[in-house]
Amino acid sequence: MSGSIEFNADKLIKKLNLIEKAYLPQAAEQALKSFGFESRKTLADEMRSRYQTATNYTLKSPRFKQDGLNLTIYINDDQSQNQSAAEYLFPTDSSDGRRRKPIKPTTLAGFLQGKYGTNKIPVPVPGSRAGRQFINKDGNLKGKKVQSLISQLTSPSASYREQYFVLTERHRGLGPGIWRRYRIKSQVSLAFALLDQKPTQDTSIDIHALLLKEAEQRLPVLIQQKLDRLLR
């Protein structure tokens, strides 16, 4: 998720005198840098407004990098995280014209595919005794809890307080999913259902259109401000 903004100075150049034209490239570069910082706040404010919940990690995910008169604004794609912000926010971006997109598979989905050979998508069951343990108060998955689940499924041990098992197909009345087994009376509860069809969601933010509109409004003002400061 990224977009580039290139500054076209033709219209502005016609209005400048020779001294101002000499300082224009420097002023434009400074203006683009300032707009980069502004764009991070613009996107964060839009996320806060459009998303039902927005974590601090999500709000801090807009980034930018500048190369002369080219400014690239993007969403953080740090692969060291459980899932990068760029990956899980991609389905919310309508810049490509789509109104609905498949939700990006989580790390848990990749783990299940590698270990159990299933392409089914794990979806938490917030109404179940086991499933609600994986959902925080904002309705988001608890990353550390999911990582703990993966560790337990990777190396099952009786020492774990929580015991989970995976069914990729219906078996003895239990549907496909990640189930928790309780020690008392061998009770079970469905933590994640495994679905054949990828769930989808409505897109909510046109990131490119939002930033281009802001650039059209703010860059001329910022450039003039930077020129005035350089010519003092």
Image (tube, rainbow, N blue to C red):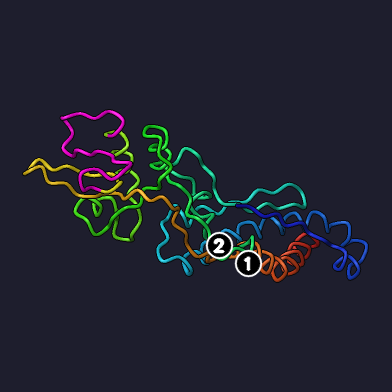
Residue on which disc 1 sits? 210
* Residue depicted at 55% across the width and 54% down the height: 62
* Residue depicted at 72% across the width and 59% down the height: 31
Is residue 198 found left or right of 129 in the rendered image?
A: right
Earlier in the chain: of badge 1 and badge 2, it is 2
The picture places residue 208, in percent across and down from the top left corner, at: 65, 62
* Residue depicted at 63% across the width and 64% down the height: 97
- The residue segment tinted magenta is 153-174
- Residue 43 shows which numbered tag? 2
**Which part of the image, by quadrant, shows the C terminus?**
bottom right
Three-letter amino acid code of the residue under disc 2 = Leu
Determine the main secondary structure of the stretch shown in magenta: loop
The picture places residue 127, in percent across and down from the top left corner, at: 24, 59
The picture places residue 115, in percent across and down from the top left corner, at: 37, 32
Is residue 221 found left or right of 105 in the rendered image?
A: right
The picture places residue 134, in percent across and down from the top left corner, at: 28, 50
Residue 114 in which image quadrant: top left
Residue 178 colored in magenta in the image: no
Labelled pair 1, 2 in contact (Cβ < 8 Å): yes
